Image (cartoon, grey):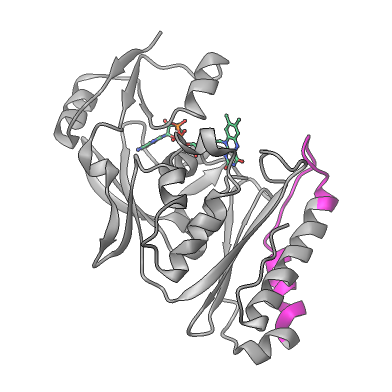
Amino acid sequence: MPEFLQPTSRKQAMEFLREKQDVRFLAGGTDLIIMLRARAVDCQYLMDVKRIPELNAFEYTPEGLTVGAAVTCNQILHADFLREEHKLLQESAITLANDLLRNRATLVGNICNASPGGDMLPACLVLGAHLHTCSPAGERVIPISEFFTGVKKHVLAADEMVVKITLPNKPGRGVYLKKRRIRGHDLAQVGLAGFYGEDGGLSFGIAAVGPTPVLVEGLGSFTREQLPAAKEEIIAKVMAQAKPISDVRSSKEYRLAMLRYFTGLAVDAFAAGEKVEVRA
Ligand SMILES: Cc1cc2nc3c(=O)[nH]c(=O)nc-3n(C[C@H](O)[C@H](O)[C@H](O)COP(=O)(O)OP(=O)(O)OC[C@H]3O[C@@H](n4cnc5c(N)ncnc54)[C@H](O)[C@@H]3O)c2cc1C
């Protein structure tokens, strides 16, 4: 059994990391505890990050929206102070697992788990999230588009703790579409977040269609009236970034078909210019 560490400050967390080897960070535990129980991962120490006050920050600052590493998906879901663009986080969070799980599951845990189908990842990609980390070696800021390196792999060092993510204020609106096998809680067969900026910029974050979630940007700038004519070209650019496999959840052909459908739905919603309920 790993020994439990419960620092109450970032300073104490760094002292533990300097003193001890083979430490894993524990947030809600909804991924990690299952992996430990299944003996799929092992460690000497489990460091609970939730008692560090800084990691519970959830507020706007001049940098935009700050979401501390201990903030749960339900805290996000029930927040009444989010700007229009950041409501995309809520659209994504409502599809993650169920109410009980969301009471524990954190946004940062979802990112650090680095599952190809993580539900919060497409939104974080299109919203331009940055991860702020610290370790005994120092601090750094990592754009989320540079974070994922493979299935359940990322650029963090073993002793590097995410303190928070920040999401810039980026006027616009987003939509999250998720296809799963059942109506209840299930991981995505395909997940797609679309974001249409007030400046006409369009971007997509796609999940479960490759070894990592992918940001599709550089699609150009469109007025609402231009979107219908550009739809097929936009779909083709999104599809070009997908490298799905067939697995227990879906065939790769089905994933591609759903990705095409979802991209078209999102473009239609943005062209309509109103809040369109397109939950799949
Ligand atoms: C029944 C069930 C249903 C689920 N359904 C979904 C679903 O529909 N969609 C979905 O996306 N996910 C789903 N999940 C997966 C899981 O709930 C999410 O990925 C969740 O957001 C993980 O957050 P956590 O706080 O529980 O992370 P933890 O389990 O605590 O940690 C996850 C990983 O991140 C690392 N980590 C955590 N915090 C930090 C930090 N501050 N710095 C560095 N590393 C850190 C941990 O070491 C671990 O490797 C489901 C899980 C279960 C058990």
Task: Give residue 198's position: percent from left, percent from top.
Answer: 48, 82
Place residue 215 in its image quadrant: bottom right
Image quarter in which the N terminus is found: top left
Can residue 107 be seen in this snapshot?
no
Task: Give residue 280's position: percent from left, percent from top.
Answer: 73, 57
Place residue 6 in its image quadrant: top left
What span is colored magenta in the figure? 230-254
Q: Is residue 223 magenta?
A: no
- Residue at 40% from the left image edge and 54% from the top image edge: 79
Give the vertical position of 133 relative to 197 (above or below). Answer: above
Task: Give residue 72's position: percent from left, percent from top.
Answer: 41, 42
Q: Residue furthest top?
A: 1
Give the vertical position of 202 relative to 130 (above or below). Answer: below
- Residue at 39% from the left image edge and 59% from the top image edge: 80
Q: Is residue 141 left or right of residue 152?
A: left
Place residue 223 in its image quadrant: bottom right
Q: Is residue 46 left or right of residue 278?
A: left
Report the front residue among 273 and 48.
273
Q: Is residue 247 magenta?
A: yes
- Residue at 31% from the left image edge and 37% from the top image edge: 160
Can residue 68 be seen in this snapshot?
yes
Task: Give residue 201's position: percent from left, percent from top.
Answer: 53, 80
Give the vertical position of 195 relative to 181 (above or below). Answer: below
Report the front residue among 279 and 156.
279
Report the front residue among 56 and 153.
56
Q: Is residue 268 left or right of residue 257?
A: left
Q: How many marks?
A: 0
